[in-house]
Image (cartoon, helix red, strand yellow):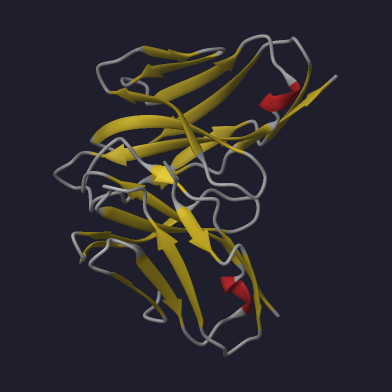
Amino acid sequence: DAGVTQSPTHLIKTRGQHVTLRCSPISGHKSVSWYQQVLGQGPQFIFQYYEKEERGRGNFPDRFSARQFPNYSSELNVNALLLGDSALYLCASSPERVGKKLFFGSGTQLSVL
Amino acid sequence: KNQVEQSPQSLIILEGKNCTLQCNYTVSPFSNLRWYKQDTGRGPVSLTIMTFSENTKSNGRYTATLDADTKQSSLHITASQLSDSASYICVVSPSPERAAGNKLTFGGGTRVLVKP
């Protein structure tokens, strides 16, 4: 079975642009969470979606948005990119809304120049 | 503010030796504490998960301990191998009543380098 897949793996953008990151959860998993990991730090929670509804939001500005599709895949959108948005963006899927079984993808490395 | 602090920040050990990583947390109440291994440029992979009632959990050469009274956890790596070189992250999940789903609190990680 395929694990959590994220695309693209790497991305270079300039300040002010917007970006869309994509995530496909493990088959059968209905929960998708997004995390931002700045180099040298632990991941920070951005969003969780479960059954296509937002179930949690971290302390991130409104420039960050996300959605989940009927097939449970998800997109993370970031508008008006800033240099500080450069990070590894991780997607994690889980079969439950609140559960111990959390599986991470390999992430999308975003560089903002 | 709920926090998870890890020490040391980085560690160099010789292949075959043991090491212990520390995690102190202030998240309260909490549902479970997890240790993840993260290779450079990859997503974290779960090593152990412990609830507040569990004192120890093993996964091969990895053994995690938890003292819920002092809010401390440790991860012990036995007979280290070159493939153990990675970041090890301590993660605390708040209790289900307060948790917004998977709004986990991650520590900054300990970077372990195993040298031959």
Residue extending furthest toward the right: B116
Residue extending furthest toward the bottom: A16
Measured from the top left, where is residue B10 in percent x and y? 70, 34
Q: Looking at the picture, does residue A97 appear above or below residue B32?
A: below
Residue extending furthest toward the left: B97
Q: Is residue B95 visible?
A: yes
Would you identify the image quadrant in which residue B4 lies? top left
Q: Is residue A21 left or right of residue B15?
A: left
Residue at 35% from the left image edge and 56% from the top image edge? A33
Q: Nearer the viewer, residue A67 or B7?
A: A67
Would you identify the image quadrant in which residue B12 lies? top right
Q: Is residue B59 left or right of residue B31?
A: right
Measured from the top left, where is residue B16 in percent x and y? 75, 10
Measured from the top left, where is residue A91 in percent x and y? 43, 56
Q: Is residue A69 left or right of residue B33?
A: left
Q: Is residue B27 visible?
A: no
Residue at 22% from the left image edge and 67% from the top image edge? A70
Measured from the top left, where is residue A97 in percent x and y? 21, 48
Residue at 28% from the left image edge and 48% from the top image edge? A29
Q: Nearer the viewer, residue B105 or B38?
A: B38
Q: Is residue B116 left or right of residue B106?
A: right
Q: Nearer the viewer, residue B35 or A51?
A: A51
Would you identify the image quadrant in which residue B52 lies? top left
Task: Check the picture and name the quadrant holding the C terminus of chain B.
Answer: top right
